Amino acid sequence: MGVSLFERRSSGMKPTAAGEDFLAEAERLLGGAQSAVARAREAGSAAAGRLEIGTYLSASTGRFRKALMGFARQNRGVGIWLREGSRDELLTAVRRGEVDLALLLGPMEEPSLDRLGLWQEAGMVALPEEHTLASRPMVFWSDLVAETFLIARRGSGPEARRKIEALLPSGHRARFVEQDVGREAMFNLVGTGLGIAVLAESASGASYPGVVFRPVGNETGPTMVEAAAYWDPKRDNPALRRFLAQLRATQRSRAG
């Protein structure tokens, strides 16, 4: 090193001034390395870390809300981030490694991704409270053939439109009006009487002025949609593995 760190005397060795500085810096570096190792071990055991979920599902009620609350309680050292987007945007983000998994509706296979079917949710329709259908316990798709559907331009909007058009009777006169707003603003527009909106049951937990939520389906019951998780099997994130384990446990308890 080109400098003496210790002085050797008959009474023993003692550090030089340079040696004292070197020891102080070495102790600081060693302490930092030990702290880094501890943090890495915590992340490896999912005691700490980050979980990014891409979804257009709402956490206002239902099983998604319960899954988030349960994971947060049991993994307080893991930060949870949510990213909203359309189905295609979120699946692309999973493939690029920008998010850990996507929680979406529809049990469809996706190339290069693993999928876990989760729970089913009832389809709901948001109606102005003065609407003639608002007093019914359930609304049929055939009742909506001439309605104006408000559809979000982003998030689940494009996918929702495809599903609605497939469920409405052929020859329907329904109109679709795209709105470049989020979920809360969309329901507030319903309350003003500009149209109706279709949603999954998990988004019906909040209340909005002048809006009522009703199940929508046919004579056999409400239309059901399945939620599924999609992730890249090559993704190496212990927090993701722990979250998937919790989702699988929930799925097994529901099946039992």
Image: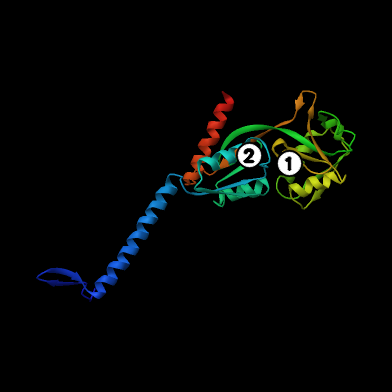
Q: What is the residue that sits farthest to the front in this orientation?
A: 11
10 Å crowding of disc 1: few (<14), some (14-19), many (20+): few
In this orientation, which residue lies closer to the viewer: 199 or 69? 69
Labels 1 & 2 near each other (Cβ < 8 A): no
Expressed as whole percent of the image width and height from the top left, the position of residue 28 reads 34, 64
- Marks 1 and 2, the one that precedes in the sequence: 2
Rendered image quadrant of residue 32? bottom left
The residue indicated by pointer 2 is 65
- In the image, what residue occupies the spot 53% across and 36% down? 246
- In the image, what residue occupies the spot 53% across and 31% down? 249
Expressed as whole percent of the image width and height from the top left, the position of residue 44 reads 42, 47
The residue indicated by pointer 1 is 206
* SS label for mark 2: helix
Q: Amino acid at mark 1?
A: Ala
- In the image, what residue occupies the spot 68% across and 38% down? 61
* Distance of label 1 from label 2 (alpha carbons): 12 Å
Please indicate whether residue 152 sits to the left or right of residue 4 in the image.
right
Expressed as whole percent of the image width and height from the top left, the position of residue 158 reads 74, 45
Expressed as whole percent of the image width and height from the top left, the position of residue 159 reads 72, 42
Quarter holding the C terminus is: top right
* SS label for mark 1: loop
10 Å crowding of disc 2: few (<14), some (14-19), many (20+): some
Please indicate whether residue 247 sits to the left or right of residue 200 in the image.
left
Is 138 above or below relative to 165? above
In this orientation, which residue lies closer to the viewer: 231 or 8? 8
Number of numbered tags placed on the structure image: 2
Q: Amino acid at mark 2?
A: Arg
Rendered image quadrant of residue 116? top right
